[in-house]
Image (spheres, rainbow, N blue to C red):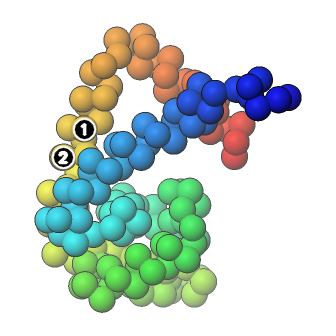
Amino acid sequence: MTRTETADIETFLSYRLSIVSRLINRRSTRYFTEKHGLTLAEWRALAQIAAGRATSVQAIAARTCSDKGQISRAIATLLDKGLITSLPDTNDRRLINFDLTAAGAAIHDEILPMRAEENAMIAGLMSEEELTLFHDVLDRIQARLD
């Protein structure tokens, strides 16, 4: 394929999805970085802990498709800031019981409605049928890539 025959990268679905994801994250990250000094990785870890889905750094990294080192640093920062606590699981010492502190819960409870409003704004661009189809397509893409 010659250079002039090369497809326009901006028509690639993966490129478009990446751009949309970055735009969404940029809007949100600006808010919780300026207001709470949190990075996107720290917010994602905090949200996973709040949802009770965090039993290890590896589990958080897997659920958020993030780099394990990045999540490890985020967890360390959240611990240093006093936003979470960490205790080894009494039944399986390989697992960690993370929990939000009162300060961490307050920040989570402030940020989550803003993220929900942003999600509603995006979802509102589609009809119910389109939204259902969109979720179906995203589920199929994610299943195939996993």
Element at label 1: helix
Image quadrant of residue 43?
bottom left
Q: Which residue is mark 1?
A: 118
Viewer-nearest residue: 66 or 101: 66
Residue 113 tag number: 2
Of the pair 93 and 116, the residue shown nearer to us: 116
Element marked by disc 2: helix
- Location of residue 144 (image quadrant): top right
User: In the picture shown, does residue 70 fall above or below 9?
Assistant: below
CA neighbours of label 2 inside 10 A, class few (<14), some (14 to 19), many (20+)? few
Q: Residues within 10 Å of mark 1 (few under 14, many from 20)?
A: some
| Residue closest to the eye, 108 or 39 | 39
Image x and y of residue 73, in percent = 45, 80
Q: Rounded to the nearest whole Å, what is the CA distance between mark 2 and mark 1? A: 9 Å
Q: Which one is earlier in the sequence, the residue at label 2 or at label 1?
A: 2
Q: Nearer the viewer, residue 14 or 68?
A: 14
Q: In percent of the image, x 45 and y 19: which residue is there?
A: 132
- Please state the horizontal and vertical placement of residue 126, each as a whole percent of the image: 35, 16
Residue 126 appears left or right of 93: left
Give the residue displayed 25% in from the left and 84% down from the top: 81
Answer above or below: position of 102 versus 145: below
Of the two numbered discs 2 and 1 in the rendering, the one whose residue sits closer to the viewer: 1
Amino acid at the residue labelled 2: Pro
Q: Position of residue 85 (x, y in %)?
A: 32, 83
Q: Residue at x 52, y 33 (%)?
A: 16
Q: Is residue 35 left or right of residue 94?
A: left
